[in-house]
Amino acid sequence: MARVVVLGAGVAGHTAALHLRRKLDKTHEVVVVSPNSQYNWIPSNIWVGVGKMTAKQVTFPLAPIYARKGIEFHQALGVALHPEGDADHSRPFVEVTYTDAARAGSRTSLEYDYLVNATGPKLNFGATPGLGPAGHTVSVCTASHAVEAATRLAEAIAAMKQGRKQTIVVGVGHGTCTCEGAAFEYVFNVEHEIRQAGVRDMADIVYLTNEYNLGDFGVDGMTFTQQGFQTTSKTWTESLFRERGVRAVAGAHVHKIEPGVVHYEQVDGSTHTLEFDFAMLLPPFRGADMTAVDYFGNDITDSVFAPSGFMKVDADYTPKPYEEWRAEDWPNTYQSPAFPNVFAVGIAFAPPHQISRPRMSPNGTVIAPAPPRTGMPSGIMGRTAAETIADKIKNPSAHAHAASMANMGAACIASAGAGLREGTAAAMTMYPVVPDYQKYPGSGRSEKDTYGEIGLAGHWTKTMLHYLFIYKAKAKPGWFVIPE
Amino acid sequence: MTDADTAISHAPLPTEKTVRSRTALPTQLMRFGAINLRMIKIILKGHGSSQA
C-alpha cells in the first residue's frame, strides 16, 4: 500500500489528486492538504471583481468532493518537509498545521511514499509597502479579495455618477510580478463596466505594468500571423488600449503605495507618482516558505527550495544571460533532484529563469516579469506528476512522464468585458509556452499555432470554460475526459 | 505622456466594420467554432505527457 500526499488544492494539486485517485486502486491512499476549505476557479475572479459573478459562483467546498472520491482531506498548511523521515518515522513525512476552526493551530505529521507540492503562491503583498487589501489597494487574487474589489469599484462608479472624476489604476504592484494577463483582463473589464454605467467620460483609466512592452504577458510577447502579415502582440495590444481609451505605464516597479498615491520607478531610472481613487494591483508571488529537514534534524531547506521559496525540480538552474537561455532549461518531470519521490507542480516549482528579458534600472531596480505557470500548464503538470507516481507505484522502474513548458501549448482567453451579447475577450493560443528559438527561429514559437483574435466568441469561450472546469473540478461523471 | 502612451497613440485602430464584426452574431458563432478548434489543436499537439 502506498500513500501519496498532495499539498495544495488549486488547479495543479486538485488535478493531481483526482487523477491519482482515478489511477490508483483503493488499497493506496491519496491525501490532500490545503489551508483553504474551498476550491476557487481563479480565472473567473476578475468577473467577481467587477460584480458580474458572486464568490459562490467561483468557489465550492472541497471536503464533499474528496469524501465522495475517497480522498483523505486535511484543511491544513504544510510547514516542514522531512524527506528522509526521522527516528520516530520510518517513512518521509510532512508537518502540517491545521487551519479549520475545530483544530486551528494544532500540528500533525503525515507520512508519505510520494509527495506532490502544489502549494501555489504566497501572495507577497509585503514586498511593496502599502500594497494590497491590508494597505491601500485591492486585489482579485482570491474570491474574497475580488468581492472587496467589486464593492470599491461600485463606490468609484457611484462617485462618477455624482459628477466626481475618478482615476482608476490597474496593474501589478512590483517589478517582479507575474499574471499580467489577469491585470490586462481586469483593466478592460473595469473599462467595460464603467462604459456600461454611462460614465466613461468621468474615468481616467491607467494600466501600470512591469512588462517592458504591452502585450508581453510575461512570455516575451507573441507574434501572430493575420491576413498575410506578422503582427506582434505589442501592436495588437496597443491597438486595443487605443480603441478603449486606456492609458498605460510600462516597465514599472512600484516602490510604495500611500493613500491615493502610487510611487513607481521605470526601467530608465525615472521615478514618478500616480494619484488614484481606485487601484487594483496584483502582488508578486513567493513560494509557500516551507522548510526542509534531514533525518537528524538539520535544516536542508536550501537544497530543496530556491531562495524564492519555490521548489527546485529537474530544471537547469545554472545562472546565465538571456541570450543563452534555452528551451531545455525547463523541467520535464517536475521531480526534485534531491528526493525523486517529491514533485513540485504549478506555481510551486522554481522556474529556471524568466521567459521575458529581465531588465534593471540604472538605480539597480530589477524589473523582470516572472514566468506565468497558471491555468492550463498547471493542470497539465499536475496530471503529469500523477501519471508518473501512479506508474511508479505499480512498477518502481517505470519511466517518469514529461511535460515541459517548452513542449506545451497554452490557450489564454483574456476577458475584455463580460456580457452574453456585448462581451469581448482576446482569445490567444501559443505553442510552445516557452519560446524555442532553435526550433522556431524568429519568434520562438510555431506561427501556425500562435494566434490571437478579439471578439464576443472569446467571451463565450471563457464562459464555457468557466462552467466546464468547475464541472471537472467537482469530479462529476466523465470529468477526466475534459482536458486540463 | 509615457512611452507606452506614445506607442498606444500610434497603434492601428480597427475599422468600424471590424469593431462591428467583433460582436456580430453570425460572425462570432463561426469564430466560436474556430477558436475551439484551435484550442483542440493545441491540446492535441502539446497537452499529453510523453515519457521522459
Image (cartoon, helix red, strand yellow):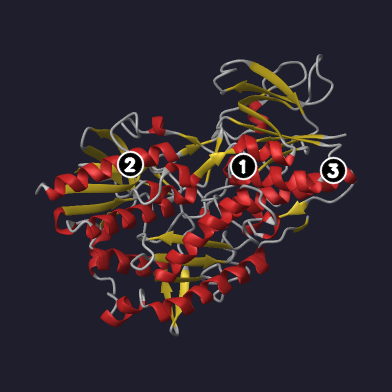
Q: How far apart are labels 1 and 3 at the CA level?
A: 28 Å
Q: Where is residue A380 in the image (x, y as percent from the top left)?
A: 65, 54
Task: Name the residue at 35% across, 60% down.
Answer: A417
What x and y, as percent, mark residue A312? 65, 39
For the C terminus of chain A, give its image quadrant.
bottom right
Q: For the residue carrying disc 1, how many other residues have a C-alpha within 10 Å: few (<14), some (14-19), or many (20+)?
A: many
From this view, report whether residue A313 is shown above or below residue A188.
above
| Chain bearing mark 3 | A
Badge 2 vs badge 1, beta-carbon distance below 8 Å: no
On the question of residue A272 being in view, the answer is no
Residue type highlighted by circle 1 = Phe
Residue sitting nearer the eye, A223 or A323: A223
Residue B52 relative to residue A128: left or right: right
Is disc 3 on the same chain as disc 2?
yes
| Mark 3 Cα shell of 10 Å, populated few (<14), some (14-19), many (≥20) | few
**Cα–Cα gap, marks 2 and 3:** 44 Å
Instruction: Name the amino acid type tagged 2.
Output: Ala
Residue A4: % across, % down: 76, 36
Q: Which of A87 and A187 is in front in this view?
A: A187
Mark 1 element type: loop
Q: Where is residue A2 in the image (x, y as percent from the top left)?
A: 84, 35
Which label's residue is closer to the chain start, 2 or 3? Answer: 3
Q: Find disc 3 in the rendering and name its residue.
A: A25
* Quadrant into which the N terminus of chain A falls: top right
Mark 2 sits on what residue? A149
Chain that bears disc 2: A
The residue wearing badge 1 is A349
Q: What element carries label 2?
A: helix
Q: Which chain is indicated by disc 1?
A: A
Whether the residues at callouts 1 and 3 have beta carbons within 8 Å, the answer is: no
Q: What element carries label 3?
A: loop
At x 36%, y 62%, the residue is: A419
